């Protein structure tokens, strides 16, 4: 399970940075505002989930606040390093642990840590599909971020930067 989660977060990093590299090739004003909001949302949510898992939820994180592009790219790298470090140092018992937390509406929930890990990856993939739709609506072809493309291209020396 650990290796699978590490692979998924490596894929997540690869896909995010395909978009960051792509966004640098087009004028900022051509990037729909909604994409900027969604990129911020995904990255701040991933950071928040990890702080919850570790038992010190950072309630200063605003998951619907737009952050500058430069900050987002750095946050993406930071998130990947933090998630990979957490995953490397975890075991099946940790992944099976039931975790209690509160959402922003102060509603209490419990979930298995492995389900939260999967949520973080699926959430990002879901929103990257939205980026693609929004770009196509502007007649801009988005980058391919399919997992199978990652699997074909993946280099074990993937840089986190």
Image (spheres, helix red, strand yellow):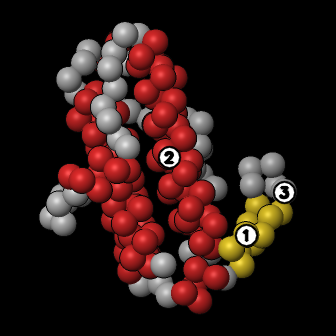
Residue 39, compared with residue 29, is above or below; it is: below
Residue at x-position 60% and y-position 72%: 114
Identify which residue, 21 or 122, lies in the foreground: 122
Rounded to the nearest angstrom, the CA distance separating label 1 from label 2 is 19 Å
The answer to whether residue 44 of the structure is visible from this angle is yes
Q: What residue does disc 3 label?
A: 107
Rounded to the nearest angstrom, the CA distance separating label 2 from label 3 is 23 Å
Residue 69, position in %: x, y? Answer: 34, 33
Rounded to the nearest angstrom, the CA distance separating label 1 from label 3 is 13 Å
Q: Tell which tag, 1 or 3, sits nearer the viewer.
A: 1
Residue at x-position 24% and y-position 18%: 26
Residue 44, compared with residue 158, is above or below; it is: above
Label 2 close to label 3 by CB (< 8 Å): no
Residue 111 — which label? 1
Residue 54, position in %: x, y? Answer: 56, 74
Q: What residue does disc 2 label?
A: 124
């Amino acid at each position: 399970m650990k290796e699978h989660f590490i692979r998924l977060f490596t894929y997540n990093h690869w896909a995010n940075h395909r978009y960051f590299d792509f966004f640098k090739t087009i004028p900022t004003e051509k990037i729909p505002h909604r994409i900027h909001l969604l990129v911020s949302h995904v990255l701040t949510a991933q950071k928040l989930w990890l702080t919850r898992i570790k038992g010190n939820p950072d309630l200063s994180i605003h998951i619907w606040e737009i952050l500058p592009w430069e900050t987002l790219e750095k946050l993406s790298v930071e998130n990947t390093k933090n998630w990979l470090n957490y995953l490397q140092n975890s075991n099946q018992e940790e992944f099976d642990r039931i975790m209690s937390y509160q959402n922003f509406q102060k509603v209490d929930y419990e979930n298995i840590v492995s389900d939260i890990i999967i949520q973080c990856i699926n959430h990002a993939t879901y929103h990257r599909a939205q980026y693609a739709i929004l770009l196509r609506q502007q007649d801009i072809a988005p980058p391919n971020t399919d997992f199978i493309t990652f699997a074909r291209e993946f280099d074990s020396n993937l840089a986190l930067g």
